[in-house]
Image (spheres, rainbow, N blue to C red):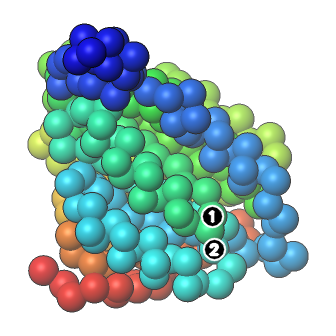
Amino acid sequence: MAVVLAASGCNLLEYSPNQAYVPAAERHLTAQNLRRLQQQPLSPTDTLRFVFIGDSQRFYDEADDFVASVNEQQDIDFVMLAGDISDFGLVREMRWMHRRLQRLRVPYLTVIGNHDQVGNGRNAYQTVFGPLNYSFVRGGTKFICVDTNGREYGFQGRVPDVSWLTQQLADTAGAQRSVVVCHVPPTDADFDPQLVQPYARTVRSSPQLVLHLAGHTHRYTAGQPFRDGITYLTTYNFEKGRYHIVSVWGRRQFRLETVQYASQN
């Protein structure tokens, strides 16, 4: 009887921490959430408001508090999570976090973090979420989501894909402004050092770029490290109990609001 039960319930068992079984409903979440986003009405104004936060990792209780707080906000279009959804790149971690974030009243989108690439994590992320590099246009704003985890590729000069980023920034169809989103900022030691300057030149080449957004640091920073007029911003992780609401409008206008939803650690 025990053998029959094990066989009939094989999808409930884990044979390896790198097992990649994912139910159909929890696959390709990026595409699923983009479809949800397309079905939502746009704001009648020129202003687009979205929540920006990073590094959920193992902070499951904090994720519940985060969801409750975001659901209280008005006029939020979507949530952007700046990578490190998981701690060890495991499918089960990504699914555990998704089951909390799917309670949001708005869609959520992600970029891949360095922790999401541990072990078999890169494949797991692509199964659960989708492409490592992708873009979409919403409310006149083009969001360009790019894998910048150079250390996870051995600093081989391939990641981030600067050529792809250049093409995306040059393609302005349907957008008056653009925002680049990644996990590792180009000022961090985990960013491929040989690509820092080519990446920064590409980013500054776009006359309609509003902001460069990243996670990884687990804290809020904002500045213009390349002294080129481009604002680079990093955001809090879930443990900090804070997130940003980013508003963009006009040609390159933006505003940041900080929301504290739990005691700061």
Q: Which mark is residue 114?
A: none
Q: Please report contact status of discs 1 and 2: CB closer than 8 Å, yes or no.
A: yes
Residue name at image x 12 percent, y 80 percent: 265
Q: Is residue 113 above or below residue 7?
A: below
Residue 203 spot, x, y in % from top left = 47, 44
Any part of residue 184 in sight = no
Q: Along the horizontal axis of the image, is 256 left or right of 137? A: left
Residue topped by disc 1: 106
Residue name at image x 78 percent, y 50 percent: 38
Helix, strand or loop for disc 2: loop
Q: Is residue 127 above or below residue 90?
A: above
Rounded to the nearest whole Å, what is the CA distance between mark 1 and mark 2? Answer: 7 Å
Q: Residues within 10 Å of mark 1 (few under 14, many from 20)?
A: some
Q: Along the horizontal axis of the image, is 249 left or right of 264? A: right
Residue 151 spot, x, y in % from top left = 17, 29
| Image quadrant assignment for residue 153 | top left
* Kind of residue at disc 2: Ile
Q: Along the horizontal axis of the image, is 204 left or right of 10? A: right
Closest to the observer, 3 or 63: 3
Residue name at image x 57 percent, y 84 percent: 73
Residue topped by disc 2: 76
Q: Mark 1 or mark 2, which has the lower sequence index?
A: 2
